[in-house]
Image (cartoon, grey):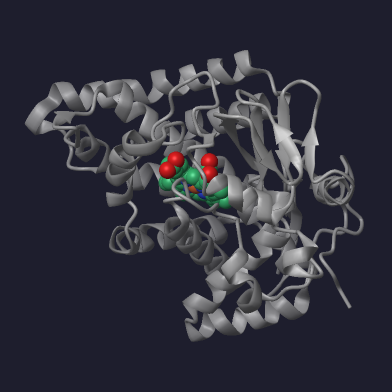
């Protein structure tokens, strides 16, 4: 039986193996420096659904809506949700399909290509810029920003992360300012529409619009490319699942394809964790977390908790759907879930429709990301 194949992978160890082992020994893990990591499903859900005790105001910067709590969070979250409804997502499907088809058609056949670098990254950037109404010339700058953002996150260096965030603000801030200045002559796109949104009866400031766009972009670009890497790796290494998915694509079984994608991401969740701060001394998983300490919710570990999922590598989309935490839970649950699943379904569908076979490359092994980043750094495949 094939389990989640990472045989033959090179590079850093699989973060999941480390988290699985750690959960068994120390499910509420303290680093001795004021940061606790929750690794069990029950503890992660408890913290994510108790925002009064586990505040999202855990970083140094205000991020809209991610770092907000309570009524303030709800007010900004309502704005964000309006852009990510099922109807809004359905409107984007055509442009996503066109970008995916063009990227797949241009990929060489019979030679090694990177599922993340050559498919995931350009697909994420092009669909995002089209959705938001940004100029196509921004693609190069955004791909470069994505790589820097990723390296800064991996370094754990907060000064670097802040510098990368500031560069994004410059890049997108100028688009926002141009639209503000153009008034009625501004293009009618998502970015312009955001400028007209109000919270508490006043329009959003430019800084707030840029913050919202940064959280969409950071969510979309890096994570989408990483998710596609996980899914394409799975298809290449599980020929039986690839056959089933090809049949589903041919029959247009959208819901079944998306459910399978979400389950594959549960097994190998590249969106590793989010931060909270304890607002009072709180007991969780048998340990007492003091007020003020940081708490990491490890989605990757919780999604593989045997107490909930049994064998974490067993592919059981229907049975595991209700407990799946790839998109979080509670008031901060990902508003981009429907968009993400549609984008991944469309990318996978176009990749399968445009090929006879996706095979693991035989001249290059896949490379795992270095913790704390999850998923794969490189997924070399050959398209036939
Ligand atoms: C690509 C795969 C994605 C994954 C795996 C993912 C996962 C998550 C998770 C786990 C959370 C919860 C965070 C928390 O509890 O602190 C979250 C929040 C969020 N996500 Fe996503 N996300 C993805 C894509 C997207 C996309 C495409 C967008 C928007 C275009 C997006 C926008 C957001 C925002 C704005 C939040 C914060 C929500 C809030 O604080 O209320 N995400 N995401």
In depth, the one of 210 and 244 nearer the eye is 210
Instruction: Write the residue at 59% across / 45% down.
Output: 47
> Furthest residue to the left?
184
Q: Position of residue 163 (x, y in %)?
A: 54, 15
In depth, the one of 285 and 119 nearer the eye is 285
Q: Is residue 17 left or right of residue 155?
A: right
Q: Is residue 258 left or right of residue 99?
A: right
Q: Is residue 236 left or right of residue 198?
A: right
Q: Is residue 39 visible?
A: yes
Residue 18 placement: quadrant: top right
In depth, the one of 319 and 143 nearer the eye is 319
Q: Is residue 125 visible?
A: no
Q: Position of residue 129 (x, y in %)?
A: 38, 42
The number of discs equals 0
In depth, the one of 180 and 277 nearer the eye is 277
Q: Position of residue 312 (x, y in %)?
A: 78, 65
Instruction: Write the residue at 53% across / 60% down.
Output: 344
């Amino acid at each position: 039986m094939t389990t989640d194949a990472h045989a033959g992978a090179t590079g850093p160890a699989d973060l999941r193996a480390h988290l699985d082992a750690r959960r068994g020994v120390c499910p509420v893990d303290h680093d001795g420096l004021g940061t606790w990591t929750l690794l069990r499903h029950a503890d992660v859900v408890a913290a994510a659904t108790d925002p009064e005790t586990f505040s999202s105001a855990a970083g140094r910067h205000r991020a809209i809506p991610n770092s907000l709590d309570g009524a303030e969070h709800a007010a900004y979250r309502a704005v964000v949700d309006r852009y990510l409804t099922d109807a809004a997502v359905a409107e984007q499907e055509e442009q996503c399909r066109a970008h995916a088809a063009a990227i797949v058609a241009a990929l060489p056949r019979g030679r090694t290509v990177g599922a993340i670098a050559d498919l995931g990254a350009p697909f994420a950037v092009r669909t995002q810029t089209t959705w938001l109404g940004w100029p196509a010339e921004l693609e190069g700058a955004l791909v470069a920003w994505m790589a820097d953002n990723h390296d800064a996150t991996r370094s754990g260096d907060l000064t670097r992360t802040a510098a990368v965030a500031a560069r994004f603000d410059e890049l997108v801030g100028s688009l926002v300012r141009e639209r503000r200045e153009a008034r009625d002559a501004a293009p009618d796109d998502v970015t312009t529409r955001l400028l007209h949104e109000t919270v508490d009866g006043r329009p959003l400031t430019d800084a707030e619009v840029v913050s919202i766009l940064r959280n969409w972009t950071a969510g979309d670009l890096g994570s989408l490319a990483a998710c596609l890497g996980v899914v394409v790796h799975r298809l290449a290494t599980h020929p039986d699942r690839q056959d089933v998915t090809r049949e589903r694509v041919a029959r247009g079984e959208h819901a079944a394809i998306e459910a399978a994608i979400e389950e594959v991401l549960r097994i190998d969740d590249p969106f590793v964790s989010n931060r909270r701060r304890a607002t009072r001394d709180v007991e969780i998983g048998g340990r007492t977390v003091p007020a003020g300490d940081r708490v990491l919710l490890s989605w990757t570990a919780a999604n593989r908790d045997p107490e909930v999922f049994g064998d974490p590598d067993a592919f059981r989309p229907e049975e595991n759907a209700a407990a799946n935490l790839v998109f979080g839970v509670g008031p901060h649950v990902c508003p981009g879930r429907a968009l993400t699943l549609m984008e991944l379904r469309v990318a996978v569908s176009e990749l399968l429709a445009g090929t006879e076979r996706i095979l693991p490359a035989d001249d290059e092994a896949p490379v795992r990301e270095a913790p704390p980043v999850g998923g794969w750094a490189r997924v070399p495949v050959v398209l036939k």
